[in-house]
């Protein structure tokens, strides 16, 4: 198996890394402090083709393979965890729903605008009582003439308050369980009854608004249905499976940022008349941190490779997301330890990396759920 990056993949990595170092890293503390959506940075990323990386050029995407997309997203998250979530939710969730399950008209009208960055996408699945237990959702979409009348609400929706296109899941047949869930394209500016209740004040992931949404007799035309009625649950699982690769990428990016910062600090910080990087205890921490990041990268690329070849990758995506998310927190934790007291202050970004890393273990499949998924796949082999 060849792990060497192609010329195009190296170019993507270097291009995104340069943009992140010049534009994102200097802004990251401000984004973290204000928690404001960085629309100007999104516009700049759109100009670089980073808002539709894995989608075909016929829909104004960049036409990149999934390795390149994961590499690019990891670099974005290295600069800002929140910005990494903005792109992941926009691309892997909302964009992928349209690409995989939308008809040609829906792709041309909605996916194209997402890929160019003209529109921002969101994926509205979770509810207060329906996080991991998706079929417990209560949002309903009832037939009403040549459309649907939607009532209910969603919670923890990344990009929810700034999105122009929302892929929404609702029950069209409440008595059919998971087979009664359908998905739709919602346009907040066009659809009366779409209400943003507010956004969450989170531990980290700043700059990516996480919204609570409400739908009050919101009517949407029937041509906004994605696929057929009753296919929504399967669509959600397939989409989240691919999305786990990108959360692994976000995790790798944050872990890499933590490692880079800790390595630089250890070489500059002196105690007992020598750099702390000379002490074996610090060297062992750095060695373990780097090894974990490399292992997470390999799991991420293995899952991406299987996805690209059209093979089953449920277990591998779950493993990549599980391991990368947990080592992201562990590496960020060690980064704080290496910084000592300074790591616990906002004078250095070490504490921000820790706050941003924790989310990886929760969204798009908690670590507990992923372990169940991995075990089930293993037992079914």
Image: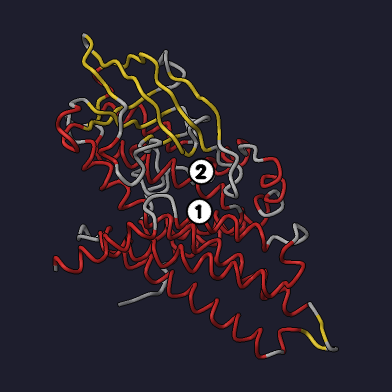
Check contact, mark 1 vs mark 2: CB within 8 A.
no
Q: Residue furthest right?
A: 273
Circle 2 — which element?
helix
Res 86 label: 2
Residue, x 49% and y 46% (percent of image)?
A: 50
Res 359 label: 1
Q: Earlier in the sequence, mark 1 or mark 2?
A: 2
The front one of 23 and 131 is: 131
How far apart, in angstroms, are the residues tagged by discs 1 and 2?
13 Å
Which tag is nearer the camera, tag 1 or tag 2? 1
Give the image location of residue 156, x and y in percent.
46, 38
The front one of 38 and 270 is: 270
| Vertical position of residue 288 compared to residue 321: above or below | below
Give the image location of residue 126, x and y in percent.
37, 38
Q: Residue furthest front?
A: 129
Based on the displayed image, in which of its 4 quarters is residue 244 positioned? bottom left
């Amino acid at each position: 198996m060849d792990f060497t990056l192609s010329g195009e993949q190296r170019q993507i990595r270097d291009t995104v890394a340069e943009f992140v170092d010049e534009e994102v890293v200097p802004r990251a503390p401000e984004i973290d402090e204000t928690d404001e959506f960085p629309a100007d940075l999104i516009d700049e990323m759109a100009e670089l083709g980073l808002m539709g990386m894995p989608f075909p050029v016929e829909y104004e995407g960049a036409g990149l393979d999934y390795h390149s997309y994961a590499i690019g997203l990891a670099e974005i998250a290295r600069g800002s965890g929140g910005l990494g979530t903005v792109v992941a939710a926009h691309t892997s969730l909302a964009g992928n729903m349209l690409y995989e399950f939308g008809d040609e008209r829906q792709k041309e009208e909605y996916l194209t605008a997402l890929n160019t960055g003209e529109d921002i996408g969101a994926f509205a699945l979770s509810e207060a009582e329906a996080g991991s237990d998706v079929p417990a959702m209560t949002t309903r979409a009832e037939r009403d003439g040549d459309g649907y009348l939607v009532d209910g609400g969603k919670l923890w929706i990344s990009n929810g308050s700034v999105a122009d296109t929302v892929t929404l899941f609702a029950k069209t047949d409440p008595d059919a369980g998971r087979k009664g869930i359908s998905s739709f394209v919602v346009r907040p500016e066009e659809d009366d009854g779409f209400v943003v209740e507010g956004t969450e004040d989170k531990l980290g992931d700043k700059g990516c608004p996480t919204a609570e949404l409400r739908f009050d007799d919101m009517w949407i035309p029937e041509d906004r249905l994605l696929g057929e009625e009753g296919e929504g649950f399967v669509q959600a699982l397939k989409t989240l499976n691919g999305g786990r690769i990108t959360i692994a990428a976000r995790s790798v990016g944050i872990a890499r940022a933590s490692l880079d910062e800790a390595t630089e600090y250890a070489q500059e910080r002196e105690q007992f008349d020598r750099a702390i990087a000379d002490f074996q205890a610090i060297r062992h921490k750095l060695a373990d941190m780097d090894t974990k990041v490399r292992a997470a990268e390999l799991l991420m690329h293995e899952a991406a490779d299987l996805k690209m070849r059209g093979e089953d990758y449920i277990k591998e995506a779950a493993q990549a997301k599980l391991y990368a998310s947990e080592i992201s927190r562990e590496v960020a934790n060690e980064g704080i330890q290496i910084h000592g007291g300074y790591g616990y202050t906002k004078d250095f970004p070490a504490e921000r990396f820790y706050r941003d890393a924790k989310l990886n273990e929760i969204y798009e499949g908690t670590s507990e759920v992923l372990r169940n998924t991995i075990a089930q796949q293993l037992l079914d082999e």
